[in-house]
Amino acid sequence: MDKPKKVLVSRQFPDIGIQLLEEAGFELTIWPKDRPMYPSELIALSRDHQALLCTLSDMISKEFLEKCCHLEIISQFAVGYDNIDVAEATRLRIPIGFTPDVMSEATADIAFGLMIATARKMFFLHKTILKGEWGYFKPRGNLGMELMGKTLGIFGLGRIGMKMAQRCKNAYGMKIIYHSRRPNPGTEKELDASWVSFEELLARSDVLSVHSVLSHETRGRFNWETFRQMKPTAIFINTARGAIHNETDLIEALSSKQIWGAGLDVTDPEPMARENPLLSMETVCVLPHVGSGTVEARNAMSSVAAENIIEFYRTGTLPYLVNPPALEK
């Protein structure tokens, strides 16, 4: 680089990525506040930079891209990118970087933990202690369910879905079925898993864990119609995106006992309102979207997001690129 490129860093990301960019000679502007930038602030600051390092809370909309079409690269501190208008970025020939795989272990741990916590009503029972309601032993009270030998259904058998399936198979001998856009014979052999139709996934799963991307096809995919096709003893887990399930329908399905329980790391909207009825349900466990919340995962995400920018200016390519057509001549 003849003249240092200016990178706008939209949040206070882990130091490792910031140091990599500084050592590579970039000039950084780091947003100093805990809150995300408002769209107007993001646009105003981006106009004076060539690159943007952002995350899911930054709305990279068509309007933003039209006003900041000078940007040479956008690197996302996340594996998902549904906050970005990828089609418009591609039209403007702005490459989008992302951070796949490095948070797979952490997110699979959250899905696995939510499954266990929901099956044993852990969040609800913890609240009874806080409220002074831990009384005498009740032989028929506070009963959950065991997971050994149950059937795990995976919706979206990508990296995270595979790791969730491995945990469930190894720990509980669970049978693995899955539904993805296409079968994966290699994974089937490794996990002794079976591809099934979406309808069969709903009907057979004792635990149904969502690991798909948010897209036009998956938005609202789990609604009243789908919940009523599940077992009344089924547990629904979502650590992908909140908009994949219809929250009103999920509340109704749980209230009417169409399904038994739910474990959520994602909600719609986020953050969830404190008076949301899901938070007081006995067989529901909710976390505040912390799937990638480990030191190891966040450091790796910061490093990969920085490397995407560094490699783009060094070689013209990105190690992890969402939209290859943006780089076509």
Image (spheres, rainbow, N blue to C red):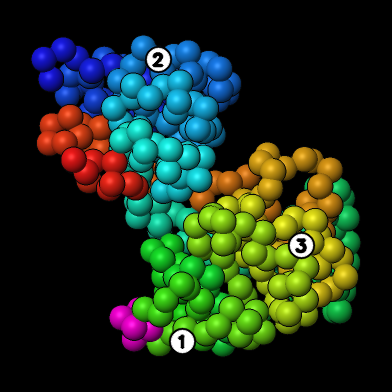
Within the magenta stretch, is there residue 211? Answer: no
Along the horizontal axis of the image, is 232 left or right of 268?
Answer: right
Mark 3, residue position: 250
> Disc 2 marks which amino acid?
Arg
Answer with mark 2 or mark 3, whichever residue precedes in sequence.
2
How far apart marks 1 and 3 lie (CA) works out to 26 Å
Q: Are marks 1 and 3 in contact (CB under 8 Å)?
A: no
Residue 194 - label: 1
Dot 2 lies on which element?
A: loop
Answer with mark 1 or mark 2, whichever residue precedes in sequence.
2
User: Vertically, is 62 above or below 318?
Assistant: above
Residue at the image point whose x is 28% and y is 46% from the top? 325
Mark 2, residue position: 47
Residue 16 or residue 241, whichever sits in front: 241
Marks 2, 3: nearer the viewer = 2
Q: Where is residue 182 drawn, in percent x and y?
A: 42, 76
> Disc 1 marks which amino acid?
Ser
Within the magenta stretch, is there residue 188? Answer: yes
Answer with mark 1 or mark 3, whichever residue precedes in sequence.
1
Dot 1 lies on which element?
A: strand
Residue 161: tell me if it is visible: yes
Q: Where is residue 16 drawn, in percent x and y?
A: 29, 31
Residue 10 or residue 315, whichever sits in front: 315
User: Vertically, is 322 above or below 168?
Assistant: above
Q: Are marks 1 and 2 in contact (CB under 8 Å)?
A: no
Residue at the image point whose x is 62% and y is 57% from the top? 219
Q: Which residues are magenta?
A: 185-190
